[in-house]
Image: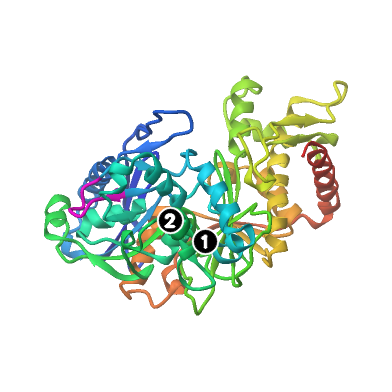
Amino acid sequence: MYLLGYDIGSSSVKVCLIEASSGKVIASEFSPKKEMKITAINPGWAEQNPADWWTNLKLAHEAVIHESGVHAEDIKGIGITWQMHGLILVDKDQNLLRPSIIWCDSRAVPYGEKAFKEIGEEKCLSHLLNSPGNFTASKLAWVKDNEPEIFDQIDKIMLPGDYIAMKLSGQIGMTIEGLSEGIFWDFRNNCISEDVIGHYGIPKSFFPEIIPTFGIQATVSAAAAQELGLKEGTPISYRAGDQPNNALSLNVFNPGEIASTAGTSGVVYGVLDQLEYDKLSRVNTFAHVNYTPEQIRLGVLLCINGTGILNSWLKHNFATSLSSYGDMNELASLSPVGSKGLSIIPFGNGAERVLENKETNCSIHGINFNIHTKGDILRAAQEGIVFSYEYGMNIMRNIGMDIQVIRAGNANMFLSSIFRQSLSSVSNAVIELYDTDGAVGAARAAGIGIGFYADSKEAFSSLEKIAVIEPEHEKQEQYLEAYTRWKYHLNEII
């Protein structure tokens, strides 16, 4: 038997088919080969047509089925993950009312700021575990004020994965995890937030049925079965936003476990078992995939904008004579821990939530023309990114998280031995690297949802660990000295 995973990103849609008993990937494909279109009619806007997600899902799905040769009746479950915080609106006939306002659209920032003040900062943080910010609820408030003719036609609101599930089944539902990422969930009262919907004037009827993250949420309709070559009645048995799902993909379920990514931007996502929050709202907190009101499992999300984009900028503007990131890493490795006193503040990709939404830009400190080389600058850049992670992880520690193990995919910055060794040593955490991705994780999770796997331990028993990185205790003093110097320069700026 087989399990399908659908990953609805803003760049592409990925489809993965795994064999349930072994966890082995049978086939995987993504569409389109070029990035999906994002429309920006005005500065700060970002919209996508959900119909494009469905079209590209069908294309990737068809390629996977063709490559695998698997029969429809042998596919026993479907899991879905998606780009978080997007807003989808449909009328009573499930027709789209407008394009989706996606995660990186910033038009609703003033709405979130106003709600934070008027509902009350302490009340928002203690009940929502976040400020309303630029999340889904605030985007819906923008529609209400600016497109009242559309708002009046709304029957249901959804997140991107809920839309895909609707296309597959004809049924609309939303999980507590989904409600929390939209900043609709009151964690203290275990219900849709009356404060948020009351402030924004959102009717409770807009919200679909609340469904479990794992379980038979809906089944494939006759129409979708014909369109996709699936069997009618195939269960949709899991759904979650991309960051909780990425953590799941790395077998991160329990307090103290951490999942991390380090692409263009970087994410550290850790699991907490108590209703705590950062009083300055420098990290976001959502329901994790295994959250229930009886078993608190929260995903605390730290985002660093200036991560791989700094390494990329250096490659294209500074290290142009080097042909690859591997060459850059090799040259950087000739520089010692601490980069001979150089410090690079990497926040050159816009305002950083971890810095209370300050925009500091990127800066180099301590450069000496007589001793510093290209390799020192390349190493200082990687160390600066690592130190920004540690700076954010200290916020996570301050709200009760005990960071012992960091799990990551073997990709992007984690391919650099300097990056991963520095991160392990400065955080005093073990780093484990795995060969997995979001679509594979969603497929495994679908197996939990249909009961094929007894629990997450069984579902991820075949997850392949590629490497383990331990802190360099003999050099820890050097790492901490470099971090202290870096933090001194950051504090001067902010």
The picture quadrant where one finds residue 73 is bottom left
Crowding at mark 1 (Cα within 10 Å: few <14, some 14-19, many 20+): many
Crowding at mark 2 (Cα within 10 Å: few <14, some 14-19, many 20+): many
Can you give x and y, in whole percent of width and height, for residue 215 in the image? 33, 72
| Foreground pick, 258 / 453 | 258
Q: Pointer 1 and pointer 2: residues touching (CB < 8 Å)? A: yes
Q: Amino acid at mark 1?
A: Phe
Q: Which numbered disc flags the more N-terminal residue, 1 or 2?
A: 2
Q: Secondary structure at mark 2?
A: strand
| Residue at image mark 2 | 241
State whether residue 223 appears in this view: yes
The picture quadrant where one finds residue 234 is bottom left
| Residue at image mark 1 | 286
> Which quarter shows the C terminus?
top right
Relative to 137, is 238 above or below?
below
Relative to 109, is 260 above or below?
below
Can you give x and y, in whole percent of width and height, for residue 414 in the image? 59, 46
Does the segment drawn in magenta span residue 150?
no
Query: Between tags 1 and 2, which lies in front?
Result: 1
Q: Main secondary structure of the magenta part?
A: loop
* Magenta range: 89-96
Can you give x and y, in whole percent of width and height, for residue 19 in the image? 31, 63
Does the segment drawn in magenta span residue 92?
yes
Q: Amino acid at mark 2?
A: Gly
